[in-house]
Image (cartoon, rainbow, N blue to C red):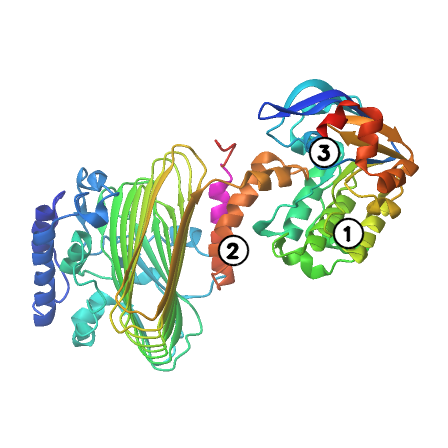
Amino acid sequence: MSQAVSTAEDYLAAQRLANLPAVGTAWLDIRRNQARSLLEGVGLPTPRQEDWKYTNIRPITRSTFDPVSGSSGWNDQDFLESIQLPGLNSYRLVFADGILVRELSSCDGLPAGVTIASVAEILRADSAKLENLLGSALPTSPHGFTAMNSSFIADGAYLDIGPGIVLDKPVELVFICACAGEDRLGMPRNLIVGRPGSHASVIERYLSVVEARSLTNAVSEVILEEDAQLTHQRITDESSRSFHVGGLFARLGGDSRLDACSITLGGSLVRNDVLVNLDASGATVDLAGLYLARGRCHIDNHTHVVHNSPSARSRELYKGILNDRSRAVFHGRITVQAGAQQTDSEQNNQNLLLSREAEVDTKPQLEIYADDVKCSHGATVGQLDEMAVLYLRSRGIGESQARGILTHAFAGEILERIELDNLRLHLDHCVSHRLSSVERVVS
Amino acid sequence: MLNVENLNVAVADEPILKGLSLQVNAGEVHAIMGPNGSGKSTLANVIAGREGYEITSGSVVFEGQNLLELAPEDRARQGIFLAFQYPVEIPGVNNVYMLKAAVNAIRKHRGDEELDAIDFLKLVREKLKLVEMKEEFLHRPVNVGFSGGEKKRNEILQMALLEPRLAMLDETDSGLDIDALKVVASGVNGLRGKDRAIVLVTHYQRLLDFIVPDHVHVLAGGRVLKSGGKELALELEERGYGWVEQSVSPSAETAL
C-alpha cells in the first residue's frame, strides 16, 4: 500500500500510490495536484529557509515514515478510557494515525444544524460541501509539510456549527498516533466552520498510544463567519520519540472571535504554525501558548497574525519553560496591511530557562503598512526570581517546592485562560507532574 | 535564644558588619536602631539566610544551633521569621496557597498533621482579623498590587500564622501611615510572650511608641555602639544618631 519515505520525492511517490478518498472529484484532484506541485517546488523545509532557520528537521528526514491513508483497524477502548479527561462531557471523534475510528467516536444528541463528521466520509458522500472551504484558510505560500498534508487529505474532522447555534458541549478531537506501530505518518486534515453567530469550543488532543517513533503532520483550518465565536484548544502530548508538525490556519469574519490556546507538553521535535487572517472589522483573535521542553526536545512556535481590515484586535501571549538541554523557538509575526487602520495588536513571549544548557530563540516581527495603529510586542528570557525563591524558603517552604510553585505560577497565566474546568484541571495536573522533576536550578 | 558574637559580614568584599554582638533572650523585645547604611538590614538578612553575604568571622547561634549552617527554610522551620523590608511580589501564586504551603511545611517539620483546606481557612480567617485584612487578600497573588501598608500587614499575617520563636521585623514601620502602624503594632504585640523573642529593626522611634521594647541597641558602622532600655530610643529621637556616634566613637567625628 505505502512505502518507507524520507524525502519530498518519496512522499510524492507514496501519495501517488495511496488509496485516498474521492479521487476523481475534479476540484479535489486539482487541489491535491496543486499541493503536489508546491511540495515538488519547495521540498521539505531546510534551515536555509528563513522560517526554518532555527529548526532543523534532519531528525525527521533521517527516518522513514509510512503515510497512513486508511484504517489499520486499531480501536483500543481501554486506551481511550485511560486518556479520558475526567468529568468532561463532549462530542468526540477519535482518529488513529489520522483516520477516524468510528467505534470510539460519539456525537450522540448533536443539535440540528451542527455537523461533526469525518472529512473522508463527507468527501465521498457530498464533496461539494467542502469545495469552497477546504484550503481557503491556508497560507498562500505554505511550507512543504502543509503542502504534503494538502496533497493527501485522507481524513480528519469536519465541524460545521450552524448559524446562531451555541453548542452545548465541547467537541473533543483525539488524534492518537503510533496505533499501527513504529514510523507511521498521520496527516489529519481538519476543517472547522463557525456560521454567523455560532459559539463552539473545540479541543484537539495529540497523543501517542505507545512510546514509539512517529510523525504527525496535522492541519486544521478554521473559518469564522460574522459574529461567530470559537474557543480552540490544541494539546500536543505525544511520545518523547515523536515528531509533530501542526498548523492552525484561520480566517475571521466581522466581529467574530477566536480564542486559541496551544499547549505543547511532549514530543521530540514539535513545530506549530499558526496563521490568523483578520478579514473584517471587529474581528478579534486571542492566541495563547504554553510549551514545556525537557530533555533534548525542540519546540518551535511560528505565529502570524494578519490584520487585513480596520478595527480588528489581536492579542498574543506565548510562554515557555525550558529544562535540561531543550530548545525552543518563537517567531511571532504581525502584519498590518495598508488600510487596516485602528488595528489594536499586542504580542508577548516569555521564557523561563531552568537549565544553563537550555536555549531559546525568540523573534518578534512587525510589518506595519497603516499609520493609525496600536501595536506592541515584547519578549523575555529569564530565570526564576531568586528573591521570590528566598521569600518562599524563608517561610519554611523547601527549595524544590518553592521553585516548583514559582514555575507552575509562570505556566498558570496561560492555564487559567482555559474555561473548561475539567480540561484546565487536567492540564494543571499534567504541568505540575512535568515540573515536579524540577530540582535545584543552575543560576 | 539568639546569640550573635563578633559577627563580621562583607558584601562584595566590602565589610558591612564589623564585629557585631547581640544577645536576645526568650520573652524579650529588642529594637535595633541606627542610621541608614549602619548594617541593620544586613543583620536581619544574614539571620534569615539570604544569599550574597559573606560571613568572614563570628557566629550566630539560635537555641544552641549554628544558624549559619542552615538553609533558609530550615531556619524558618526552627522558628525564625523575618518580616521583609520589601515584601516580594509573586505573580501567579495566590496568597492563600503560599500561606498554606508555609504553614504545612512548618507543621510537618514539627510533626503535626498538615491542615486541609477547610481547617486552614478557619485558622487564617482568625488571623486576618488580627491584622484587619479582608478575606479577598487571600485570593490575590502574593503582594501583587498591594499598597505598602497591605504588604506589611501581609507580613504580620504570615508571622501570626507561622508563630515563630524569633521574629525579626525589618523596617516594618517604613512607609506606614499611623493607622496601619497601629494595626501592625497590635499584631506584633499580640505575639509577645515568654517563649518568644522579637527584634525590631527600625530607623525611627515612632514604632516604639506602640511596641515598647525591653532593650534598644544603636547600630552604626557595623557594630552595636550603645545599648540601653527603652529610654535610649527617646534620647535618640531627641538628640539624633550623631550624638551616639560622637559620644562613643571619636573616629565618627571625622566621618561627619
Q: How far apart are marks 2 and 3 (CA)?
A: 40 Å
Q: Main secondary structure of the magenta part?
A: helix
Q: Could you tell whether B25 is left or right of A358 in the image?
A: right
Q: In which quarter of the image is residue A136?
A: bottom left
Say which residue appears at 18% left-offset and 37% top-offset: A62
Q: Where is residue A105 in the image (x, y as percent from the top left)?
A: 34, 63
Say which residue appears at 78% left-offset and 58% top-offset: B132
Say which residue appears at 71% left-offset and 43% top-offset: B103
Q: Name the residue under label 1.
A: B123
Q: Earlier in the sequence, mark 1 or mark 3?
A: 3
Looking at the image, is A344 positioned above or below residue B123? below
Task: Read off the magenta span.
Answer: A430-437
Say which residue appears at 83% left-offset and 49% top-offset: B185
Give the chain of mark 2: A
Q: Which of marks 1 and 2 is in front?
A: 1
The label number, if any, that marks residue B44 in the structure image: 3
- Does residue B164 show up magenta in the picture? no
| Residue closer to the observer: B147 or B14 | B14
Q: Position of residue A202 (x, y in %)?
A: 38, 65
Q: Disc 1 marks which amino acid?
A: Leu
Looking at the image, is A323 positioned above or below residue A113? above
Farthest top residue in view? B57
Give the chain of mark 1: B
Mark 3 falls on what kind of element?
helix
Q: Mark 2 points at which residue?
A: A425
Q: Disc 2 marks which amino acid?
A: Leu
